Amino acid sequence: MNTKRNIINVGLVGLGTVGTGVARILKSKAASLTNRTGFEFRLKTVCVKHSGKKRALELGKTKITTDPRVILNDPEIDQVVELIGGTTDAYKILHAALSKGKDVISANKALFAERGEELFRLAGRVSRHIGLEASVGGGIPIVKALSEGLAANRVSAIIGILNGTCNYILTEMTEKNRTYAEVLKEAQAKGYAESNPSLDVNGTDTAHKLAILARLAFQRKIDFKKIRKEGLVGISPEDIFHAKEMGYTVKLLAIAKTEGDALDLRVHPALLERGHLLANVNGVFNAALVRGDEAGDILFYGRGAGERPTASAVVSDMIDLARLRRVGVQPHHRDFKPAILHPASQTYSRFYLRFRVEDKSGTLGRLTVMLGKHGVSISSVHQVAAPHASSVPVIMLTHRANEKKLFEAIRAIDRLPIVRQKTVVLRVEGE
Amino acid sequence: MNTKRNIINVGLVGLGTVGTGVARILKSKAASLTNRTGFEFRLKTVCVKHSGKKRALELGKTKITTDPRVILNDPEIDQVVELIGGTTDAYKILHAALSKGKDVISANKALFAERGEELFRLAGRVSRHIGLEASVGGGIPIVKALSEGLAANRVSAIIGILNGTCNYILTEMTEKNRTYAEVLKEAQAKGYAESNPSLDVNGTDTAHKLAILARLAFQRKIDFKKIRKEGLVGISPEDIFHAKEMGYTVKLLAIAKTEGDALDLRVHPALLERGHLLANVNGVFNAALVRGDEAGDILFYGRGAGERPTASAVVSDMIDLARLRRVGVQPHHRDFKPAILHPASQTYSRFYLRFRVEDKSGTLGRLTVMLGKHGVSISSVHQVAAPHASSVPVIMLTHRANEKKLFEAIRAIDRLPIVRQKTVVLRVEGE
């Protein structure tokens, strides 16, 4: 084997948490990586924001610059790893790197979900590769599994818990009966949640990851903006308590299902039966259940974020792209047909409903009649005693109902004078 | 892209359950496979035992032979898929195929575990590849994950449930309080267990798979014969019941852990805390927990056997090897150093002990004193009332104890006149 040929020069843009992790692995595991893969990865240049900053990591012969062009214009650099985040500069860097014949790797889910197609098309045109394992599920090799390990499968569904912050918040609320605000504050203090957690808790981050997985699994262009999403806001300890009483756990789910030729894509909190595999994924952990026509249900579980897991995924991409450099086939970068999205008006689910109504006879009857008029039938009712209150909570689980009609029913119900609060609606999934 | 160059001619030896599954995927998904991978897989020749047999599958232009040499001597054939099982003929076929410059794929765990090294060495010498994804975990892409997705990790442990038959038996015993013999008989009737299930229930099949995973994860030659193994025989409903009472589930585990420079490799039933991820893997499902220094704990879960999951893995290997055909690097076929195995005398575990002793005062004291003499201390004792019997069961959980010393203590205890039955010893894992 020609050793010279097996040197891979790497340019790293961004030396934050994950970038530092990547640099550390390349330095501390150089020998074992070469041993395992036959390639010698050299971190030739690192582009940072502030060149003077003191760093924990000894970079040795690696050149440090503040100008990404030093990397982009270096003909010796084979792979560019982008870890600065954002969708503007990061896009420009990946675009320029591909144009110059470099393979690129990034953990940037927002970029791939929102502007990925242009980059995939460019990669296909210039016969270069894009590594995106680190953009979903941290150290879990889910991208590789979907694009390679399960390549013989027609996937019919992906159900995932893809945001560690949300899962941590829901786990704490469930196990310790705490409020959303309380747990979020603590998570921020501990560094599990960003100081601005809105992209996490409103479901955007989960939707980014869902867009990336769905593209790979269903081989369709996904219009990210069209993914229906609901976040954690509105989830109260009361709902988590009632769900628990009935044998369910509340999780923020990413769902992609085939419905005929269309794709049902959504992100929302949902009740899962306690025995469901995903119901037992707790804390900051992520998991994805993939349903293939050949392999059946496969679950992948692990840490979905953090320096070391994400860096692990980046380095596995570096190895992959080094191998693929000499292969012409680029299965993931094809120009897919756009996905047809399945409309809410044709989506059926079971629902959890929490009403707050006047405590007088006939109330339950009026609710069920109103639901029945919209084709929604009830599978169980749970009325909570509240001796000294003028209103009481009523919890219902419905049979499978049309989502659009259900929301029409709820709007009508919420206008009734016996109803004292906006009704809480959560889906029941996984059955 | 040169289309001609992308035709892959496949020879399939063995048209049993999995072979039929592979042929079916290649026929029914030809267009989608080409679309996804850029390769056109042509099932050129199939070697069967009886050429006249009526088959469910229409093989079209595929040639049928009863002589494997028709495949081995065909210079057009790029990949040979061996699915006949056994370690003699299968070995010869893979050896001959590699020698003739073909890539090979097999689901044969016994072959890879017992005679793999010779084949890996040969593959390295002739620069060809061996696909073995289908030999462990059915449709779960665990081989790919260990050898590629987690390549940046130093793995410190693998804990797996790798035999669906055993897991089905234990699940039924646990959930329905049935006996081992009863469930086994039913599993055979349903086709979940072989008519001769000894390789499954005595732990051999699990040990084969463990040998394959450990080799990949730890990059060491594994001497299969030296894997310590215990099977299901001896597990009684009584033990499963007591384990449950104390919050544990009994599973047949495959364990590979680093202990300094050595590897602790073993297969045995063990108690797992009910909340442990693997404790919730039920029925015929398989799972493996991999602990990497970068990625942390990652769990892979799915169907570990069956026509379709195993065929799914075979086809994913076909795609991989087609890609790798033009790449010189063969990371998995290196001639590894032999693993140093960690001896039982230096292994520490917690233990579950079930004694059957005379129902008289002082008995408990004698047991604890005897255990204490061998350095075994007790974390909990559970004495079961048996009003009309002359002997009673006593259940103990120990603190971490040296395995060798514990068995010495048990041998001494079993010689005491107060002891009425051979003591049952099970390990407690996963803490």
Image (spheres, coloured by chain):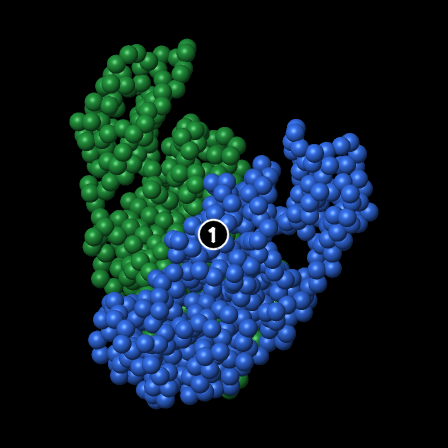
Chain colours: A green, B blue
Asked whether residue A69 appears in the rendered view, the answer is no
Query: Which residue bears the numbered disc 1?
Result: B184
B430 or B61: nearer the viewer: B61
In the displayed structure, would residue B377 be above or below residue A334?
above
Q: Position of residue A10 (x, y in %)?
A: 49, 72
Decide which of B63, A182 is in the foreground and name it: B63
Q: Position of residue A319 (x, y in %)?
A: 47, 71
In this picture, residue B62 sits left or right of residue A200: left
View extreme (left): residue: A373
- Quadrant in which the N terminus of chain B appears: bottom left
Instruction: Determine crowd level at label 1: few under 14, some 14-19, many 20+ residues with C-alpha closer than 10 A.
Output: many
Judged from the image, the secondary structure of the residue bearing numbered disc 1 is: helix
Residue at image position (30%, 11%) is A360
From the viewer's perspective, tell me whether residue B51 is left or right of residue B194. left
Quarter of image, res B104: bottom left
- Asked where in the image residue B292 lies, by quadrant, the reply is bottom right
Q: Residue at (69%, 36%) from the top-left corner?
A: B391
Query: In the displayed structure, does residue A310 sit left or right of residue B365?
Result: left
Considering only vertical position in the picture, is B67 above or below A357?
below
- Which chain is indicated by disc 1? B
Q: Residue at x 51, y 70 (%)?
A: B110
